[in-house]
Image (spheres, rainbow, N blue to C red):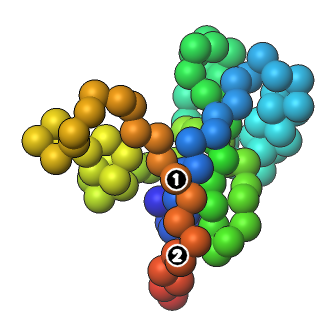
Amino acid sequence: ILGPYGMEGKLTGVGYKYNDPHMARFLNNWHMFYLHPHGRANWKIHSEMSSVVEVLIGGARMKYPASYVFVTEEDHLEVFPSSENSSSNDNVLPTAQPNLKPCNLP
């Protein structure tokens, strides 16, 4: 679920860090319209985590601030299956889903 409007999207597994100059500019531009929940400085603090993630919305790939992406339990189970259902210990990355359900916004 993508904030601030609750759009439905799927993570592609691609992430970008704040230290990339293009992503820093992207986040600063985003911040002009939407406040970052923890302020601009927090994007720089968590350098080991992705600040921007790639999402698939209606067949289009978009970059989105990670702080505005909410992963539901259903999505979590697709990405990280339980060890009972998995035959190996390899990490499972999210994959793009070509047939997304339409988002039913009022």
Closer-to-camera residue (32/63): 63
View extreme (left): residue: 84
How packed mark 1 is, by other alpha carbons closer than 10 Å (few <14, some 14-19, many 20 or more), is some
Closer-to-camera residue (10/94): 94
Tell me if residue 1 comes above or below residue 98 in the rendering.
above
Task: Tell me the kind of residue under disc 2.
Answer: Leu
In x, y percent, where is residue 63?
72, 48
Disc on res. 84: none
Q: Residue at x 37, y 46 (%)?
A: 79
Disc nearest the viewer among 1 and 2: 1
Disc on res. 100: 2
Q: Residue at x 58, y 50 (%)?
A: 12
Q: Circle 2 sits in a helix, a strand or a loop, which is it?
A: loop
Q: Circle 1 sits in a helix, a strand or a loop, which is it?
A: loop
View extreme (front): residue: 87
In x, y percent, where is residue 14?
64, 39
Tell me if residue 24 comes above or below residue 31 in the rendering.
above
Closer-to-camera residue (41/74): 74
How packed mark 2 is, by other alpha carbons closer than 10 Å (few <14, some 14-19, many 20 or more), is some
In x, y percent, where is residue 29?
85, 41
The residue labelled by disc 1 is 95
Q: Residue at x 73, y 67 (%)?
A: 60
